[in-house]
């Protein structure tokens, strides 16, 4: 069932939803990485399917605000986050936020869910794709120095669990370790590599870890 803004009764939650709704501008359905079997790093542009993201995007702000996502690096307060979602990165937009931290800093799962894909690519380096519990959103963590010990595809994770460590793998500058974090709304096929970008900035909180 689609949740509307009127259903949000918490003033704090309503504030997050209203701030986030302004960020949900139309965006193409994209492929975050090409299928692993093809061993390529080209971002694939897709076409929205009927009943896919056009209606889904309308409630993304409400759904994400209700997830109470945490900042994926415990030592970084909300005030230090920068909204880099719309910054240019070559021929395409960034569609993510970068969170600077020393190399080796633990990276935390922003939400409960499961690890869907561990993937190494030229742009992202060591990456993690996590689905939320309802398989509606994918959380993407990139440039990791290493994965947490024992992390595997299919592993269930809980909010605040260490899943990796900040690094500079992929196309990150060697002297600028950071976490590249993105959220995308999944289509009906639930492909880990494809979805509609959503700006994470408004949804990350200094919640209990």
Image (cartoon, rainbow, N blue to C red):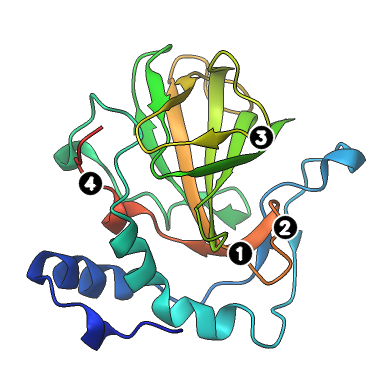
Q: Which residue is mark 2?
A: 191
Q: Is residue 23 visible?
A: no
Q: Residues within 10 Å of mark 3 (few under 14, many from 20)?
A: some
Q: Which residue is mark 1?
A: 186
Q: Residues within 10 Å of mark 4 (few under 14, many from 20)?
A: some
Relative image position of residue 63 (x, y in whole percent) = 38, 68
- Distance between the Cα atoms at labels 2 and 1? 7 Å
User: How many labels sit on residues?
Assistant: 4
Which mark's residue is nearer the viewer, 2 or 3? Answer: 2
**Vertical comparison of 34 with 57: above or below:** above
Q: Which residue is mark 4?
A: 205
Q: Which residue is mark 3?
A: 123
First-in-chain label (4 vs 3): 3
First-in-chain label (4 vs 1): 1
**Vertical comparison of 143 with 183: above or below:** above
- Distance between the Cα atoms at labels 2 and 3? 19 Å
Which residue is farthest left?
11
First-in-chain label (2 vs 1): 1
Marks 1 and 3 in Cβ contact (< 8 Å): no
At a point 57% along the width and 59% down the height, the residue shown is 135
- Residues 152 and 173: in front is 152
Marks 2 and 1 in Cβ contact (< 8 Å): yes
Q: Residues within 10 Å of mark 1 (few under 14, many from 20)?
A: many
- Distance between the Cα atoms at labels 4 and 1? 22 Å
Q: Which element type, helix, strand or loop, lies under badge 1?
A: loop
Q: Which element type, helix, strand or loop, lies under badge 2?
A: loop
Relative image position of residue 134 (x, y in whole percent) = 52, 61
């Amino acid at each position: 069932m689609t949740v509307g803004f009127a259903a949000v009764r918490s003033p704090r939650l309503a504030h997050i939803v209203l701030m986030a709704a302004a960020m949900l501008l139309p965006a193409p359905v994209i492929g975050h990485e090409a299928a692993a079997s093809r061993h390529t790093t080209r971002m694939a542009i897709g076409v929205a399917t009927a009943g896919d993201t056009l209606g889904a995007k309308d409630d993304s702000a409400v759904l994400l605000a209700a997830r109470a996502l945490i900042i994926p690096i415990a030592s970084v307060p909300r005030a230090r986050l920068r909204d880099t979602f719309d910054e240019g990165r070559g021929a395409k937009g960034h569609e993510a936020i970068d969170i600077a931290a020393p190399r080796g800093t633990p990276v935390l799962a922003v939400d409960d869910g499961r690890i869907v894909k561990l993937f190494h690519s030229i742009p992202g380096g060591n990456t993690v794709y996590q689905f939320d519990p309802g398989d509606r959103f994918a959380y993407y963590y990139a440039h990791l120095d290493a994965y947490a010990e024992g992390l595997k595809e299919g592993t269930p994770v809980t909010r605040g669990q260490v899943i990796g460590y900040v690094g500079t793998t992929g196309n990150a500058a060697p002297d600028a370790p950071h976490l590249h974090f993105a959220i995308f709304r999944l289509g009906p096929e639930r492909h880990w590599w494809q979805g509609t970008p959503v700006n994470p900035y408004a949804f990350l909180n200094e919640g209990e870890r």
